[in-house]
Amino acid sequence: MEEIYQNNIIDVEYDDSSVRTLEWNKHIRHRPGMYIGKLGDGTSADDGIYVLIKEILDNSIDEFMAGFGRVIEVTLNDKTITVRDFGRGIPLGKVVDVVSVMNTGAKYDTKVFKRSVGLNGVGAKAVNAMSSHFEITSFRDGQSRMAIFSAGELLDVKSSEGNALRNGTLVQFTPDETVFGVYEFNVEFIEQMLRNYSYLNTGLTIKFNGQTFLSKNGLLDLLNENLSSDPLYSPIHLKNDDIEIVITHTTNYGESYFSFVNGQHTTQGGTHLSAFREGLTKTVKEFYKKDYDPADIRASIVAAVSVKIEEPVFESQTKTRLGSKDMGPQGPSIRQFVCDFLKKELDNYLHKHPDTADVLNKKILEAERERKEISGIPKKSREVAKKVSLNNRKVRDCRVHYNDKNPLAEKSMIFITEGDSASGSITKSRDANYQAVFSLRGKPMNCYGKTRKVVYENDEFTLLQAALNIEDSMDNLRYNKVIIATDADVDGMHIRLLMITFFLRFFPELIRLGHVYILQTPLFRVRNKKETRYCYTNEERQLAIAQISNPEITRFKGLGEISHDEFRNFIDDNMRLEQVKITKEDPIMGLLEFYMGNNTYERQDFIIDNLKIETDLIKELEAAQNLN
């Protein structure tokens, strides 16, 4: 094709041959992000391989919601997922079409699926196209029909009559490594997904590899499962056919929400969550007949919200944020529906439970006092200090942020590091389109046991909060990943601990929503003239030494010691990240008290009793190798 250079611009000939038409499966494989978000390798709960499971499960859940099939069986065998429901089964004549012909499905008919998650007939087709092996079988009234595909290409169709198997649908698929690369399923992510489905569908039994997930109390069970500290009052549980809400407050800072639409976990909220927050503050203000600040009412809240609506509109194919404004074509607005529900049910509950109302009122007043303490710090001087510092190389920002409408928004991240040399290495190595750097000045304060006021009196915390843009709301978060990048030495580990303490204390939602990570950088470089290996553990180092002749071994003690040319390898798309997680099983307050509290001598004894120096580890490795 002829290329003509004019004004340093390549002008490529544009004619009929430039226009291409891709088959449905080729398009999905060519642009997977349009259908399942990011691909990933299975190390994050929102990686594409889990979206595939969810797309198939949603169809089975829709059957349950329509009143058919109370059991769903899920199995994971190596990298193959099988989902069997006992609903009505797909009409036999359409088994092939519903998973291979775009814009084909029963979800367009709200009489058949009144409150469905899958609306566009895309989900199962995307799974089919992105699977090296995909099998679907429908059982209906003693007959069955099976279709077998590979990468969306139909290989075989089989029919049978006279079987005694129960009605329903069976789907088996293996995500294609030519699409996803090397991946591994994390069973914990699958279990949490299934657990959420059981909470949202009371009476549904989900069986997975020998485990059973069944919830009797719906969202109340979900909230109790996810509380990281004791609630100040027994959770308030309100529900009817189309809405379910659970509310409580804790001693933690921040606001924590779990929101769902037709069983879909809307991790980024949407119109239903906005309506809940508005309706809650209105109802509480009217109940106490006081003009409380909404932020004081919601401070330390933990709540779960689930609504069922007709023909929901999500802001992306991955359905993480609801865009619908109405409950359905003929229904009221979501805002009116949720606010009216809270005005009636929450107001009634508070009148019937004066003890709970009293505890809630005291919590609001406590939050109000603390907010006024903070407002005593001159806001104008704080804003001036933030602008000066943030524009003075404190933050090397990126071009695309998490709240932008941009394909790179999901990739946006900020590295929190300490010292000029370390931040300099990352800054020179990063992709400035979506990677930002925040430079700490020395070790941050240990904020365990401190109040929110300390954030505004400490320059580092004030500037970090401003850089993340979470001062007023987590909705404004500027980066999808907040990555703590410190040296792999004692001081680096201490800084890491201090930063995690800060987030756990004041912004636990940042961790709960999966935004906080630890950057893993290599401890050693083992190389000769022909080969270079970077080793993250002593085990990897020992293996490299055994396999590389006459190696030169370098021990990286700090991030600043790694050249920016090398560092680029450690913060690219294949970077090693460890996600910081919290669950109910994690005794957060107890852990913080032990590791960050004033029990110095007790902590010192623990360190001495559990100390292992590097030479001890090497001896253990050598002994293990000798045994082998």
Image (tube, rainbow, N blue to C red):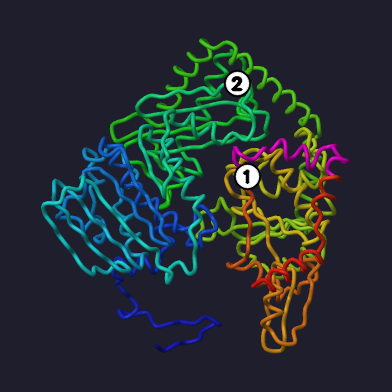
Rendering coords of residue 414 (x, y %): 67, 57
Q: Which residue is mark 2?
A: 233
For marks 1 and 2, give the CA distance: 24 Å
293 versus 563 height, above or below: above
Rendering coords of residue 475 (x, y %): 58, 42
150 versus 387 height, above or below: below
- In the image shown, does 60 or 13 lie closer to the viewer? 60
Q: Earlier in the sequence, mark 1 or mark 2?
A: 2
Q: For the residue marked with disc 1, what is the amino acid?
A: Leu
Identify which residue is drawn at 66% across, 21% down: 363
Q: For the residue marked with disc 2, what is the amino acid?
A: Tyr
In this rendering, which labeled residue sits more in front, label 1 or label 2? 2
268 versus 145 height, above or below: above
- Span highlighted in magenta in the image: 582-603
* Magenta segment includes 572: no
Residue 510 has which mark? 1
